[in-house]
Image (cartoon, rainbow, N blue to C red):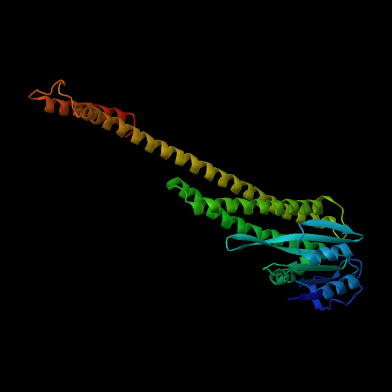
Amino acid sequence: MTVVAAYLYRHGARVRPVAIGEKIDCPQDKSEFMWIGIADPTDEELQTLQNTYDLHPLAVEDARKGDQLPKIDVYGDQLFVVARTARLDADTLTYGETAIFVGHSHLISVRHGSARGHSELREHLEAAPALLMHGVDYVLHSILDFVVDGYLPLVETIEDEVLSMEQRALDNFLNRDEVNRIFTLRRELIRFQRVLGPMSEVAGKLVRLDLPSIDDDAKPYFSDVLDHVRRVQVMVDGLREVLSSVVEFSHLMEQQRTGAITRQLAGWAAILAVPTAIAGIYGMNFEYMPELQSRYGYFVVLGVIAIVCTTLYLRFKRARWL
């Protein structure tokens, strides 16, 4: 897949398709611009875009690699923005990249490894010409907001799993697979934080700095993106703390259960030590031992054993050892 969509927009309405090598002179009032969307482009397509729209070679090289962390660079009167997409693939977070070239009258989005296309987003924006007519800065906000909104379902899915795991830790010992899953989730969340941090910085720069092609009227929209990123960051931090507490709580519960079992074993061992000691003494083969000739000695010994064992049992029961 290469060119997904390429259109010329005027006053918020789609005018016609354009070729990626077609150069159009647009007015300075931002009422007319081109929005080109490409997925997994070839080197030839990127070279064509570079020549047509005077893209910086370093930005084009970054867009070709598709492995950059979120960032924002300024090249003359153009912006180069990188955002990281994420999806949950077989219980593992998989990342993609969306690189965005922003000029006065053009916006070029280059996607790598992203399962969510921008077709639905484009249709949504085209249905609201009053917003789309603001120009490329509003489209940039919409793409970043689209990417960040994709984070929330992933975090909520992980949150449900973490809460379920927390409940299982309350009820039973965690098995080896569950412990491995906990550390896998912690590792995935740490990797995710490495994406969220730079994404927050990108949104913050779009809000605070005076950047080419970004009007002051558009900055409140980027502030909304920043709020969404921070919300996800707070959720991820909370999930990491919950996972750590699950491990600690499971360890404490295991110690508590082990201690209870140890106390029970110690209590029964003390009780059984009484008949064992008495039987051991009278089991020795000596001729002159007390009570050997007693008529009721056997029953007396059994009675003593029963009384002592019952007394010990009641005391251990009162102390909650049994």
Residue at point 79%, 75% (across, down):
6
Say above or below: 173 vs 107. Answer: above
In the image, 92: left or right of 122? left
Q: Nearer the viewer, residue 113 or 234?
A: 113
Residue ranking furthest to the left:
295
Residue at point 81%, 77% (across, down):
15
Q: Quadrant of the N terminus?
A: bottom right
Say above or below: 181 vs 106. Answer: above
Residue 170 percent across, percent down from the top left: 45, 45
Residue 316 percent across, percent down from the top left: 31, 30
Residue at point 57%, 58% (across, down):
157
In the image, 14: left or right of 150? right
Residue 292 percent across, percent down from the top left: 12, 24
Say above or below: 90 vs 39. Answer: above
Q: Nearer the viewer, residue 89 or 285?
A: 285
Q: How many marks?
A: 0
Q: Is residue 179 visible?
A: yes
User: In the picture, residue 262 is in which quadrant?
Assistant: top left
Residue 281 percent across, percent down from the top left: 22, 26
Q: Nearer the viewer, residue 91 or 76?
A: 91
